[in-house]
Image: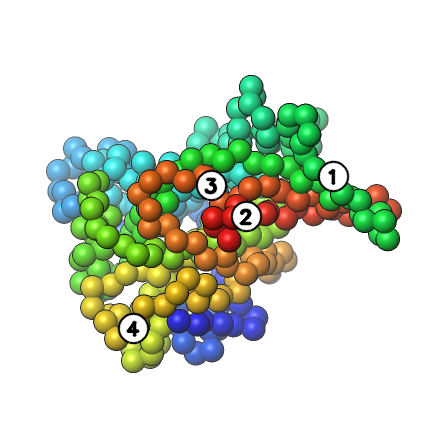
């Protein structure tokens, strides 16, 4: 299950193209960024997830991508209030899984506030700040933290800021991604995902999964661009031994990817181990593609567990060169997620 591209995928605000060695084409694409108008997906009148038709059950505003990830542009017409309430728990776990990245990137979610990572009374707290119109970060740690190293040859300083092990339920975070992908599917494709629909809505969820592979990649970890994008990639050759549909979500500095499990379009595939998916991804911003956000290699993780686990990032390594004033953040993953 190897999908590779030398140049990655380029998604522009007016046009887009994706090249994956001819293996995939873009099935559906949604994007929101500063200057974009609101977009609504799905048909009004019937819930895509439970077939509810009572107009009184569609009073809440349903987001295609969670508002907590900075989405103020993409919405769903066909998600009832009951399903919306179920999915809110999934989305909360997804946000907790990537909360440190949202803090570092300054991604404003609900109530237009950037989430803080850690409590003010605890250790290893990261907080987004704004002073005189300038955005910044405040780190707080106990004695002995953070760790500091200096390269004697370059004088570059590396400071490791530990991140609190915020608990999240991996399977619920995975379900949040699967729900977004299902919401984006064209109507003609729904027949291939009836089991997925039932599983997404099942709160008891006793299905045994050896692996629910999730790919996690990072872009620039400074002030994150205000954007969200959701893309469905569809296999071109139906005899090819690759996933039928892949879902890729970008929200500011973070990018996530899953294989959307179909009922019948992947029966010819052999089970593949973690680490087999390899996509390089980038997003272009602006009408003339003035800015290009590059997301590094996807880190594969198994999000099948229903038990709580610590969010994947153990610390941020801040590298600073005092000679050039250049600096960068690098996330260091926890051992269990490497």
Locate residue 130 relative to residue 319 in the image: left or right. Answer: left
Per the image, the residue denoted by label 2 is 333
Mark nearer the N terminus (2 vs 4) = 4
C-alpha distance separating marks 2 and 4? 30 Å
In the foreground, 189 or 103? 103
Q: How many other residues sit within 10 Å of disc 4, few (<14), some (14-19) or many (≥20)?
A: some
Numbered badge on residue 311: 3
Q: How many other residues sit within 10 Å of disc 2, few (<14), some (14-19) or many (≥20)?
A: some
Residue drawn at x 67%, y 40% is 160
Q: Are marks 3 and 1 in contact (CB under 8 Å)?
A: no
Instruction: Label 1: state its secondary structure.
Output: strand
Q: Are marks 4 and 3 in contact (CB under 8 Å)?
A: no
C-alpha distance separating marks 4 and 3? 30 Å
C-alpha distance separating marks 3 and 1? 23 Å
Q: What colouring method underlies this structural image? A: rainbow
- In this view, the mark in front (3 or 1): 1
C-alpha distance separating marks 1 and 2? 18 Å
Instruction: Label 3: state its secondary structure.
Output: loop
Q: Where is residue 308 in the image (x, y as percent from the top left)?
A: 37, 38
Mark nearer the N terminus (3 vs 1) = 1
C-alpha distance separating marks 3 and 2? 9 Å
Per the image, the residue denoted by label 4 is 269
Q: Where is residue 297 in the image (x, y as percent from the top left)?
A: 54, 61
């Amino acid at each position: 299950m190897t999908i590779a591209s030398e140049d990655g995928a380029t998604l522009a605000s007016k046009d887009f193209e994706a090249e994956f060695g001819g293996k995939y084409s873009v099935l559906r694409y949604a994007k929101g960024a500063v200057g974009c108008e609101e977009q609504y997906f799905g048909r009004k009148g019937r819930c895509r997830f439970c077939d509810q038709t009572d107009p009184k059950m569609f009073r809440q505003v349903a987001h295609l991508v969670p508002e907590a990830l900075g989405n103020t542009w993409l919405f769903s017409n066909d998600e009832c209030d009951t399903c919306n309430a179920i999915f809110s728990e999934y989305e909360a776990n997804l946000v907790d899984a990537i909360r440190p990245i949202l803090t570092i990137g300054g991604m404003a979610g609900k109530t237009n506030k950037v989430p803080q990572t850690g409590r003010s009374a605890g250790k290893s707290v990261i907080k987004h700040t704004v002073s005189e119109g300038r955005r910044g970060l405040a780190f707080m740690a106990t004695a002995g933290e953070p760790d500091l190293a200096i390269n004697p040859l370059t004088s570059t300083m590396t400071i490791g800021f530990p991140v609190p092990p915020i608990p999240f339920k991996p399977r619920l975070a995975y379900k949040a991604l699967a729900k977004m992908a299902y919401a984006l599917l064209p109507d003609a494709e729904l027949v291939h995902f009836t089991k997925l629909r039932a599983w997404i809505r099942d709160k008891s969820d006793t299905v045994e999964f050896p692996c629910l592979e999730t790919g996690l990649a990072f872009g620039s970890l400074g002030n994150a661009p205000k954007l969200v994008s959701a893309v469905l990639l569809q296999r071109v050759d139906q005899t090819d031994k690759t996933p039928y549909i892949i879902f890729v979500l970008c929200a500011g500095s973070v990018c996530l990817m899953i294989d959307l499990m179909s009922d019948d379009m992947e029966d010819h595939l052999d089970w593949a181990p973690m680490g087999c998916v390899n996509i390089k991804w980038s997003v272009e911003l602006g009408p003339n593609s003035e800015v290009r956000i590059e997301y590094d290699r996807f880190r594969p993780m198994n999000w099948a567990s229903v038990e709580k686990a610590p969010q994947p990032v153990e610390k941020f390594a801040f590298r600073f060169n005092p000679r050039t004033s250049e600096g960068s953040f690098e996330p260091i993953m926890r051992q269990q997620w490497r």
